[in-house]
Amino acid sequence: MNIIIGITGGIAAYKIPMLIRLFKQAGHEVQCVATDHALQFVTRLTIETLSGRRLYSGLFEESNERSTEHIALKEWGDELLIAPATANIIAKMANGIADDALSTLTLSFTGTTKPVYICPAMNTQMLEAPATRRNIEQLRKDGITIIESGCGELACGAVGNGRMAEPEEIYNNVIPCKIEPLKGKKYLITAGPTYERFDAVRFIGNYSSGKMGYAIAESIAEKGGDVVLISGPTHIESKHSRINTIRVESAREMYATAIEHFPNCDGAILTAAVADYRPKTQTDHKIKKKGDEGLTIELIQNPDILATLGSMKKGCQMLIGFALETDNELANAQKKLSKKNLDYIIMNSLNDRGAGFGVDTNKVTIIRRDGSVTEGSLKSKKEVAEDIVALLK
Ligand code: C5P
């Protein structure tokens, strides 16, 4: 494959030589294009030696083979990857500005149907600035793949989001045949309904099938990650060797198992339809029919597993919850995201046909902590699972 790497002026540019080596070792051709600022962080000599090709960095350089190098490169490249992508190049791309070699190439390349990837890398506040968020959202709408930055130590000394994805992770996104991006990671998933028993043979439950949670667990395992799957009662079985399924019945059992395992995990995705209330008393015998006066069962509140994990969350642990809303959907989901200290909330709406309990399809909206929202289309639960798992680091 012919890969064009556009390098812009961020400290993470020092990792690009390693990325070039990964591509070259796997037999791909790499052409680098750098901004002037990028060349303050990484040298022309290093890039040209590793890629085996002359670096393209100025529209009017004498060494350019032709005056329309950016058009020739657009033809040559199979994929364009901008790494690191500064707030500046992101803003230019979102607005179609073409004022140097890289932005000119980028504009012409995004006019083709070939894949374009960007790896944002910057200080947390720059990343969370409204303009950057708007621009990244625009690029997403334009069909550009964002290889999200991670949380960690930044060049300014602060710890936060904005650290460029590691070369291996970038490689795995751009060359899809090497597919174990979650190797070494472990995630906790809750799935299915809970049953809240009130006598020897009866319980209060719900219609959740567990399909969404199991699909997410499978997708993580396929990408090399380990999974602790805490499952309420369901007929589904997971056979993947990297999925450790722990079967529970009630919300309290699910809660105890989740808080035991969460500290050893890199994150959690809670899809279970947990009963908010349980019967205050449970009897070991079957409650007898009493006649005309009816039967009253007093309910008390169950613990909120998601909110508890939100309060336990440490460092870069990622927490994703689901919200099944019927009205004021977006506002309610956003409120839940911040109240429960989540990184993402996945919103289903009961108003959407084909979404929700039991069915094999789902339609979700992904809401991020920074307030940005991506509305998905109706897809199989497997495809939705892939979209959600792509959010994991
Ligand atoms: O607040 P609400 O119940 O709508 O939140 C839904 C999300 O919270 C889902 O991710 C669900 O798995 C989780 N949840 C939980 N424990 C509860 C109730 C909900 O983990 N007791």
Image (spheres, helix red, strand yellow):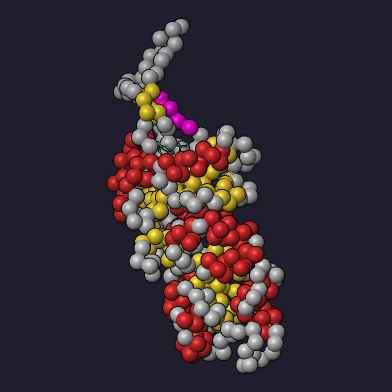
184 relative position to 218: left or right: left
Q: In the picture shown, does residue 278 fall above or below 77? A: above
> Outermost residue, top direction?
292
Instruction: Give the camera-side residue of 318 and 33.
Output: 33
Task: State the residue at coordinates (44%, 11%).
Answer: 294
Instruction: Identify the image quadrant of residue 142.
Output: bottom right
Q: In the picture shown, does residue 101 fall above or below 274? A: below
Q: Position of residue 337 (x, y in %)?
A: 46, 44
Instruction: Give the camera-side residue of 332 and 266.
Output: 332
Q: In the picture shown, does residue 369 fall above or below 48? A: above
Task: State the residue at coordinates (32%, 47%).
Answer: 312
Q: In the picture shown, does residue 19 fall above or below 324? A: below
Task: State the residue at coordinates (45%, 59%).
Answer: 125
What is the span of residues highlighted in magenta in the rendered image?
A: 201-206
Instruction: Give the camera-side residue of 111 and 216.
Output: 111
Instruction: Identify the image quadrant of residue 54.
Output: bottom right
Question: Is residue 107 within the magenta segment?
Answer: no
Q: Position of residue 271 (x, y in %)?
A: 46, 44
Q: Position of residue 254 (x, y in %)?
A: 36, 40
Task: State the residue at coordinates (40%, 46%).
Answer: 341
Note whether residue 176 is visible: no
On the rendering, which quadrant does ligand 1 occupy? Answer: top left
Q: Position of residue 88 (x, y in %)?
A: 55, 68
